[in-house]
Image (spheres, rainbow, N blue to C red):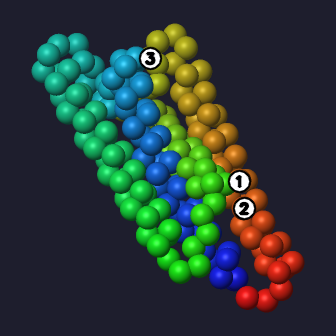
């Protein structure tokens, strides 16, 4: 593996962590708080009265805190990657990693929480399966686009190294 190619991998990984954390924060802020379509455990403990609302809000907060922590770790990893000798910043790698991370979050969260455990659904009601499927499709699309961008950037590094010669 070339030094240039090795330099891009930490950016992809850091971007993926940031994307995963931002995906969690987007989910929590938009679906839980702004739209109020669901809470973290709303299918298990429906927020029909104040005690269950508070219970769900607590777990929404834990979910948001985890998203914040993952984002902060990803930002720290970006800083570390940028401080390394031979580091080459690449918007494509960071954006590709970010999209892949966000998509990965959506796919895992959708499969685990919506389908397997049934903790909550994107938008309960008549079209619940369609909303849950759309969430998975959105995540899968971001994951694929992110991986393709990341691969293009790594391939671009390899082609650049080949045209520059050794080292």
As rendered, which of 92 and 45 lies closer to the eye? 92
As rendered, which of 89 and 130 lies closer to the eye? 89
Label 1, label 2: how far apart the Cα atoms are = 6 Å
Q: Mark 1 points at which residue?
A: 149
Depth check, mark 3 against mark 1: the one in front is: 1
Label 2, label 3: how far apart the Cα atoms are = 40 Å
Label 3, label 1: how far apart the Cα atoms are = 34 Å
In the rendered structure, the answer to whether residue 47 lies left or right of residue 117 reads left
The quarter holding residue 150 reads bottom right
Instruction: Determine crowd level at label 3: few under 14, some 14-19, many 20+ residues with C-alpha closer than 10 A.
Output: some
In the rendered structure, the answer to whether residue 164 lies left or right of residue 126 reads right
The secondary structure type at the circle numbered 3 is: loop
Q: Name the residue under label 3.
A: 124
- Residue shown at 18%/28% (left/top)? 55
Please tell me the numbered disc located at residue 153: 2
The secondary structure type at the circle numbered 2 is: helix
Q: Position of residue 125 (x, y in %)?
A: 46, 12
The residue sitting at the top extreme is: 126
The quarter holding residue 3 reads bottom right
Instruction: Determine crowd level at label 2: few under 14, some 14-19, many 20+ residues with C-alpha closer than 10 A.
Output: many
Q: Please tell me which of labels 2 and 3 falls first in the chain.
A: 3
Please state, as top left, top right, bottom left or bottom right, where the C terminus lies in the image: bottom right
Q: Are marks 1 and 2 in contact (CB under 8 Å)?
A: yes
In the rendered structure, the answer to whether residue 131 lies left or right of residue 28 reads right
In the rendered structure, the answer to whether residue 159 lies left or right of residue 4 reads right
Q: Please tell me which of labels 3 and 1 falls first in the chain.
A: 3
């Amino acid at each position: 593996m070339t030094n240039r190619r090795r330099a891009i991998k930490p950016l992809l990984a850091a971007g993926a962590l940031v994307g995963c954390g931002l995906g969690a924060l987007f989910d929590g802020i938009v679906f839980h708080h702004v739209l109020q379509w669901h809470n973290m455990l709303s299918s298990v403990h429906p927020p029909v009265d104040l005690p269950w609302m508070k219970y769900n809000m607590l777990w929404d907060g834990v979910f948001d805190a985890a998203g914040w922590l993952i984002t902060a770790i990803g930002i720290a990893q970006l800083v570390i990657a940028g401080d390394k000798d031979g580091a080459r910043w690449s918007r494509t790698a960071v954006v590709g990693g970010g999209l892949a991370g966000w998509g990965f979050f959506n796919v895992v969260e959708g499969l685990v929480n919506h389908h397997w455990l049934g903790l909550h659904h994107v938008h309960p009601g008549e079209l619940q399966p369609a909303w849950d499927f759309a969430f998975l499709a959105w995540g899968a699309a971001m994951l694929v686009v992110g991986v393709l961008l990341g691969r293009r950037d790594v391939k671009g590094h390899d082609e650049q190294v080949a045209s520059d010669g050794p080292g």
